[in-house]
Image: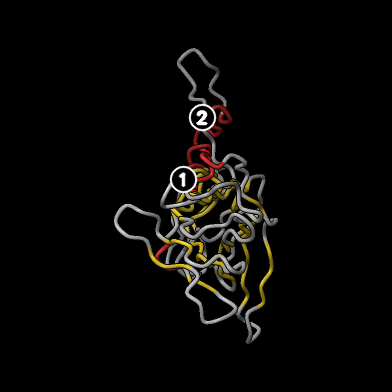
Amino acid sequence: MSTLYTGNGLNNPLQITIPSDGDAKPAASVNAALEGLMDKITSSQLPAFDAAVDYPLFPRSVARAQNLIAAAPQSASNRAPYTPGWGWEGAWIQTNVGAADYLDVPLLLPHGSVLTLLQIYLKGSNLPGVHAAMPATKPQVRAFRIDETLGIASVTPITSLTTDPETVVANYEAAHVITISGLSVSIDNTIYRYSVRVIGETGANSQTGLELCGILATCTVNLMDSGAS
């Protein structure tokens, strides 16, 4: 008796077994291949006319460069703690070292993905050789999740506060990276936005000219955003 089979979208076979002439010919030998093919089609099918359904994808890791121009300098006073870079210089340059002023850089991450790695690229100075020694307080970075559905922004850290690892002046003033790894942050763009806070150098031996050069965010993508979020 025939059976209607609609396919199992959760089963995404990488291969199916096709019977050959020498094989026995029970219905199961043919049905297994047909069911696998239908499962593959169902798993790969775009949602039809339903903006609330996200398209499942085979999980893969992707890295995305972030838009530094959208960063917002923050200061406790009316100082200008950071200014945009020029030419090939960093996107932002620290111009005041009197306090731990910072930059908030929006993170644009795929909805439904899992953030696994952040890499923040810096140069300790746009004029190499200005530091007589390492600054007492080196740059630090931290990522946040912001929930604005409550009427006022509710800010939650999603990473630890991570300090610039460089200890040698020449390496610090050259391009280098602050890495925040081992993350597993589920991204939900329906109610949250995300940002990285970059806190500049301060204290003894600190100098203006710290450059923020770039931010890379690596995520595991599990679905294609339907557009509803």
Seen at 68% across and 64% down, the residue is: 157
Please indicate, yes or no, whether residue 5 appears anywhere in the rendered image.
no
Instruction: Give residue 124's position: percent from left, percent from top.
Output: 50, 50
Q: Amino acid at mark 2?
A: Ile
Q: Is residue 111 left or right of residue 184?
A: left
Instruction: Give residue 16's position: percent from left, percent from top.
Output: 51, 29
The residue under label 2 is 16
Binning the other alpha carbons within 10 Å of mark 2 as few (below 14), some (14 to 19) or many (20 upward) gives few
Mark 1, secondary structure of its residue: loop
Seen at 59% across and 65% down, the residue is: 188
Classify residue 28 by image quadrant: top right
Q: Amino acid at mark 1?
A: Gly
The residue under label 1 is 129
Between 188 and 53, the one lying in front of the other is 188
Mark 2, secondary structure of its residue: loop
Q: Tell which circle, 1 or 2, labels the residue nearer the N-terminal end.
A: 2
Q: Is residue 67 left or right of residue 152?
A: left
Q: Which colour style is shown?
A: secondary structure
In the image, residue 104 sits, relative to residue 186, either above or below, namely below
Instruction: Give residue 178's position: percent from left, percent from top.
Output: 57, 47
> What number of labels is visible?
2
